[in-house]
Image (cartoon, helix red, strand yellow):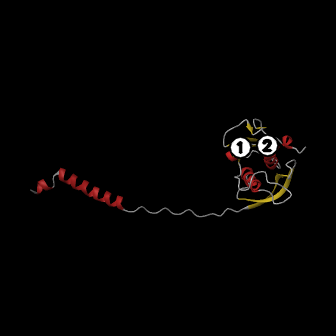
């Protein structure tokens, strides 16, 4: 009788049963919570930048020196912070904002010395006319090309477009394209 109790089959089954119970207990344990990442405060650098707006007659670009704060001093981060200030509008009452208050700033990307500006879809519905549309694109161009870069290419809502209203956007804008006449 004892021989039947300790047969090879019974011993293997008992070992599998013990292994199954141990595995079940291991699976039922609550997982150890992950350790929270340590918060590292990034140091903000303060920089002065030149931002262009327009005069009340929408005929000339007027610069304002503004202070921005960036956590990274790479050119793309500086350019994006500058466009955020541009979208907020001028501090001086002698200058006129180019986009309505509360309008989202365009996203800017950089490849080498070439800027790519992704205008939000709302910019296509501003209905400024040719001079206002030119001023919109030229204040952006002059703001970005103030210290570095060769040209600015504009896209609308992530897609290349031929025009913004009446202004040709197929070719990149350069400094000389945006001089006051």
Q: Residue furthest left?
A: 1
Closer to the eye: label 1 or 2: 2
Mark 1 neighbour class, 10 Å CA radius: few under 14, some 14 to 19, many 20 or more: some
- Label 2: which residue? 129
For residue 82, which quarter of the picture?
bottom right
The CA span between labels 1 and 2 is 11 Å
The percent position of residue 125, horizontal first and vertical second, equals 71, 45
Position of the C terminus, as image quadrant, is top right
- Mark identifier at residue 124: 1
Mark 2 neighbour class, 10 Å CA radius: few under 14, some 14 to 19, many 20 or more: few
- Mark identifier at residue 15: none
Seen at 82% across and 52% down, the residue is 53
Q: Tell me if I can see residue 120 in this picture.
A: no
Check the image and report above or below for 36 versus 62: below
The percent position of residue 50, horizontal first and vertical second, equals 83, 54
Position of the N terminus, as image quadrant, is bottom left
| Observer-nearest of 147 and 137 | 137
């Amino acid at each position: 009788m004892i021989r039947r109790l300790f047969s090879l089959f019974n011993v293997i089954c008992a070992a599998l049963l013990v292994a199954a119970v141990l595995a079940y207990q291991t699976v039922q344990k609550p997982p150890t919570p992950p350790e929270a990442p340590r918060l590292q405060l990034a140091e903000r650098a303060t920089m002065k930048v030149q931002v262009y707006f327009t005069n009340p007659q929408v005929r000339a670009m007027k610069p304002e020196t503004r202070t921005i704060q960036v956590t990274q001093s790479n050119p793309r981060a500086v350019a994006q912070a500058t466009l955020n200030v541009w979208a907020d509008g001028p501090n001086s009452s002698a200058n006129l904002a180019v986009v309505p208050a509360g309008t989202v700033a365009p996203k800017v990307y950089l490849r080498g010395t070439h800027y790519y500006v992704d205008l939000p879809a709302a910019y296509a519905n501003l209905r400024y006319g040719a001079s206002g549309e030119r001023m919109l694109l030229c204040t952006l161009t002059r703001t970005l090309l103030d210290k570095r870069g060769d040209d600015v290419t504009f896209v609308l809502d992530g897609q290349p477009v031929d025009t913004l209203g009446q202004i040709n956007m197929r070719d990149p804008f350069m400094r000389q394209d945006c001089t006051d006449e």
